[in-house]
């Protein structure tokens, strides 16, 4: 299995190809960057596009390397942590904690780390599109102690039960619901985005606090920095739009810390409030 530094080097090469060759990932990222950063010049947008495609390619190469490799070889590369005291303070409340981890930075490394913090962790995951990847992904993500549950009624019930026991649960808060009934439209970088209501429902019904977390890749394959970010007020609000707006505000606060490492290739604004679909072609 490739070493972490080699994995990131390979990812950088693939990202360079994604930038220079016509492909759908480049097209999706370009549309999203144009929507979310109208204040940037054409040159700045082009630079962000190139950086983001490079970072996304690193994520793609990291996945199999992390799932099949030794967790310690990745966890040992975490050079520092910022805001860790936020989590400890929230855990002392005894209501459990909802960890909101956006598609930002090395989220597979973050998943490994979260399960080693000395508190039980239940993680929600969406089974892969290709069944052949199911066992590899499941085993790879659960090796450091996380309990993985699928995005169905049984999985949601497991999250509530974990919070009731005062444990941690982890969710990707920027994953678009499969249908409009699974969320509401709320602004994300000034654009209406179909936003899940699961995090808000969990927070409101359980009383558990929310904290955002992500694993930033340091320059020059220099390892990682684990960030913890306080959540905005209102995520547990009874008004679903107010709650979703607060959730997106938290995700945006994380993304603005290292925008080049966000998954801009995701069709985040595909659904539109009028019922139509945005063209990413």
Image: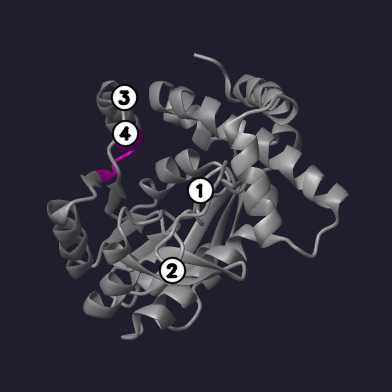
**SS for dot 4:** loop
Q: Position of residue 105 (x, y in %)?
A: 58, 45
> Which of the 4 image quadrants contains residue 164?
bottom left
Q: Which mark is residue 186?
A: none
Closer to the chain start, of discs 3 and 1, is: 3
- Please tell me whether mark 3 or mark 2 is closer to you in this view: 2
Q: Position of residue 165 (x, y in %)?
A: 18, 66
Q: Using residue 252 as the reference point, say whether residue 147 is left or right of it.
A: left
Residue 276 part of the magenta-drawn span: no
Q: Compare residues 226 and 46 and report the one nearer the observer.
A: 46
Q: How far apart are the two marked residues, 3 and 2, measured between alpha carbons?
A: 36 Å
> Which of the 4 image quadrants contains residue 90?
bottom left
Per the image, the residue denoted by label 1 is 267
- Please tell me whether mark 3 or mark 1 is closer to you in this view: 1
Q: Residue at x 30, y 43 (%)?
A: 126
Q: How far apart are the two marked residues, 2 and 1, measured between alpha carbons?
A: 17 Å
Per the image, the residue denoted by label 3 is 133
| Tag 3 and tag 4, C-beta contact below 8 Å | yes
Q: Using residue 197 as the reference point, say whether residue 245 is left or right of it.
A: right
- Please tell me whether mark 2 or mark 1 is closer to you in this view: 2
Q: Position of residue 217 (x, y in %)?
A: 64, 42
Q: How far apart are the two marked residues, 3 and 1, measured between alpha carbons?
A: 22 Å
Closer to the chain start, of discs 2 and 4, is: 4
| Tag 3 and tag 1, C-beta contact below 8 Å | no
234 is higher (above) or lower (below) than 59: below
Closer to the chain start, of discs 3 and 2, is: 3
> Which of the 4 image quadrants contains residue 166?
bottom left
Q: Residue at x 39, y 61 (%)?
A: 99
Per the image, the residue denoted by label 4 is 128
Q: How far apart are the two marked residues, 3 and 4, measured between alpha carbons?
A: 6 Å
Q: Residue at x 64, y 27 (%)?
A: 8
Q: Which residues are magenta?
A: 141-147
């Amino acid at each position: 299995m490739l070493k972490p530094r080699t994995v990131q080097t390979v990812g950088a090469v693939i990202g360079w190809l994604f930038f220079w060759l016509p492909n759908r990932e480049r097209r999706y990222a370009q549309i999203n960057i144009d929507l979310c950063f109208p204040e940037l010049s054409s040159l700045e947008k082009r630079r962000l596009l190139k950086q983001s495609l490079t970072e996304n390619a690193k994520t793609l190469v990291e996945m199999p390397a992390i799932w099949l490799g030794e967790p310690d070889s990745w966890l040992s590369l975490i050079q520092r942590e910022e805001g860790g005291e936020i989590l400890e303070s929230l855990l002392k409340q005894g209501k459990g904690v909802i960890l909101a981890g956006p598609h930002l930075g090395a989220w597979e490394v973050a998943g490994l780390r979260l399960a080693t913090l000395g508190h039980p962790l239940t993680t929600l995951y969406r089974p892969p599109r290709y069944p052949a990847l199911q066992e590899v992904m499941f085993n790879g993500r659960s090796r450091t102690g996380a309990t993985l549950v699928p995005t169905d009624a049984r999985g949601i019930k497991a999250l509530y039960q974990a919070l009731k026991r005062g444990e941690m649960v982890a969710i990707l808060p920027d994953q678009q619901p499969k249908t409009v009934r699974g969320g509401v439209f709320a602004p994300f970088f000034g654009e209406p985005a179909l936003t899940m209501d699961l995090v808000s429902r969990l927070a409101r019904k359980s009383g558990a606090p929310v904290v955002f977390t992500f694993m930033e890749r340091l320059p020059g394959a220099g390892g990682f920095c684990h960030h913890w970010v306080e959540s905005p007020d209102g995520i547990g609000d009874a008004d679903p739009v107010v709650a979703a707006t607060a959730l997106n505000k938290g995700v945006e606060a994380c993304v603005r810390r290292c925008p080049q490492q966000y998954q801009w290739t995701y069709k985040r604004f595909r659904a539109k409030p009028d019922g139509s679909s945005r063209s990413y072609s």
